[in-house]
Image (cartoon, rainbow, N blue to C red):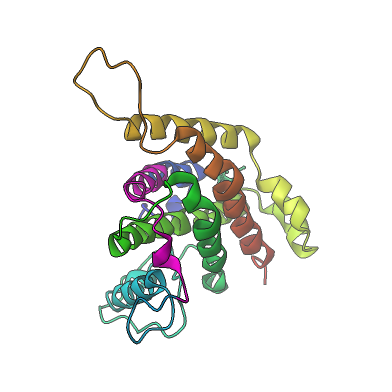
Amino acid sequence: MDDSGASSLKLESIRESLIRQEDTIIFSLIERSKFPINSRGYDESLGLVQGFSGSLARFIIEETEALQAKAGRFQNPEEHQFFPENLPPSLVPPHDYPKVLYPAAASININKRIWDLYFNELLPLFTVVGDDGNYASAVASDLSCLQALSRRIHYGKFVAEVKFRDAQQDYEPAIRTKDRDALMKLLTFENVEEMVKKRVQKKALAFGQEVSLNHNDKKVKCKVDPYVVSRLYEEWIMPLTKLVQVEYLLHRLD
Ligand SMILES: O=C(O)C(=O)C[C@]1(C(=O)O)C=C[C@@H](O)C=C1
């Protein structure tokens, strides 16, 4: 959260954070698209890393997360690990993050799903086929994409909390009867989703276009197809953010 305390929790400021996170996601996709797909970096059976059974991607991301855990990254309730098993403890003094979410919310982590989705479905949509051997650099960019996506999707916890506080009487019956469909309906704002899709498409066009000094150059070339970015939001990012909201709300009254 950008605000300093739970009392300043407003849907508007939560949405502002989601809007700012769009920039991070789009820039990270643009960075990753510099490299071709580089599939060998994700092959679990190639044995590229001596003494490690798994892909180069898994190796880099596990090791990076271990280092970031020691530096306190996952103390922040907005951050979620891809490999929570055997993470080393933080070595830095704890920061006093505002206590906005209920404590059990920490156990909601859908990164396994985000991981599978990213590598199997999303990556092929915004990278070209090919192999330039730059596996380590490509994976470093993958990690930026994964962390940006994970942070955005799990931000659903904060969105859900503020919606619950704003309309507790509407949410309580559906929470008590564990009615997922009713919760999904309550938290969905189709007009907002339409705006998100349009805005991210426009941002991808603005952030990713080739800049030319040649005035005769009328054709706009984009590093990442703006339509693909809008599709990522429509088909995966927003549905998963809503899934996190439902998971969060289901246990809100435990
Ligand atoms: O802005 C909200 O109200 C949200 O819940 C976030 C979000 C999104 O993921 O962007 C998800 C569900 C709503 O239907 C609209 C937008």
* Count of labels in the image: 0
Residue 113 x, y percent position in the rendering: 57, 64
Task: Kindly indicate the quadrant of the structure image that contains residue 223.
Answer: top left
Q: In the picture shown, does residue 224 fall above or below 103?
A: above
Residue under the point 34% across and 35% down: 208
Q: Position of residue 55 (x, y in %)?
A: 42, 73
Residue at the image position 64 percent from the left and 36 percent from the top: 190
Q: Position of residue 78 (x, y in %)?
A: 43, 62
| Camera-side residue of 14 and 167 | 14
Q: Residue at x 33, y 79 (%)?
A: 49
Answer with left or right where residue 215 lies relative to residue 247: left
- Note whether 197 is above or below 2 in the view shown: above
Work out whether residue 188 or residue 200 is closer to the camera in this orientation and state it. Answer: 200
Magenta-colored span: 21-45
Q: Is 89 situated above or below 215?
A: below
Q: Nearer the viewer, residue 234 or 108?
A: 234
Q: Which image quadrant: the C terminus?
A: bottom right
Outermost residue on the right side: it is 177
> Is residue 31 left or right of 253 when viewed as pictured?
left
Looking at the image, which residue sits at the far top? 216
Between 116 and 93, the residue placed more toward the observer is: 116
Q: Is residue 26 magenta?
A: yes
Q: Quadrant of the N terminus?
A: bottom left
Q: Left or right: where does residue 157 sit relative to residue 52?
A: right
The spot of residue 53 in percent (x, y) is 43, 83
Ligand 1, by image quadrant, is top right
Locate residue 247: give its quadrant: bottom right
Residue 109 visible in the picture: no
Q: Main secondary structure of the magenta part?
A: helix
